[in-house]
Amino acid sequence: MKNIPDHERQAVIWSFYKPRHTHAWNMLVLSWRAFDAPSDADMPFEDEYLWENFIIRLWLYRSAVKTLTRLSAVSADARDILAKFDRSFEVSGQNSLKTIRDMIEHFDDYAAGIGRGPAMREDELDPWRKISRDMFERGRFVIFRISAYDAAINLRSDAKQVSDAFITWYKSSC
């Protein structure tokens, strides 16, 4: 790819981004909608599953949008919109979304006491905490479903603006 002009290299990245972005968004929406299904009081672990899926889907959507930071023409704007999204989850200087996602993805490390994030095994890992469909809490790390989805909607809108700016740049560079 070193011999390919910059605008073509950038187009390759964007062509990877667009379908991945759409897929990640659709999966996030499906995980959001799953909360609307009736809850079975005899199976409260289902709510935890819904939350884990939603948290992972939020992070995967963020990861898809992060692809825009690889596009030199819009990289700074892409970093700004990700920072804005991340601030929606900030608790005492820590990103609750990333922290909880890490606890879910790396449960075995945290259970063994060797998790690398800010979460503490004794304080945040306890899987028996009460979970509601509106809030997921692990110690000091809390995610509210509605505000998390609103942050994702804002990120989607911001990502569209950044993507449109890239397309404008691309058309002018050809």
Image (tube, rainbow, N blue to C red):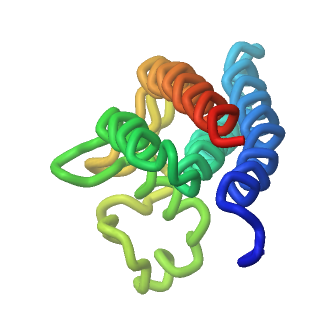
Residue 45 visible (yes or no): no
Q: Position of residue 93 (x, y in %)?
A: 19, 52
Q: Is residue 5 above or below residue 17?
A: below
Q: In this view, does 85 lie above or below 147?
A: below
Query: Which quarter of the figure has residue 1?
Result: bottom right
Q: Where is residue 146 in the image (x, y as percent from the top left)?
A: 48, 18
Residue in view at x 41 percent, y 39 percent = 77
Query: Which quarter of the figure has residue 168?
Result: top right
Q: Which of 57 and 84 is in front in this view?
A: 84
Left or right: 141 as drawn, with respect to 127: left
> Which residue of the protein is positioned furthest toward the left in this rendering?
92
Residue 19 visible (yes or no): yes
Q: Where is residue 8 in the image (x, y as percent from the top left)?
A: 75, 55
Residue in view at x 68 percent, y 52 percent = 7
Left or right: 161 as drawn, with respect to 22: left
The number of numbered badges drawn on the structure is 0
Left or right: 3 as drawn, with respect to 116: right
Left or right: 27 as drawn, with respect to 117: right
Q: Is residue 38 above or below residue 112?
A: above
Query: Which quarter of the figure has residue 172?
Result: top right
Residue in view at x 33 percent, y 47 percent = 141
Residue in view at x 42 percent, y 86 percent = 114
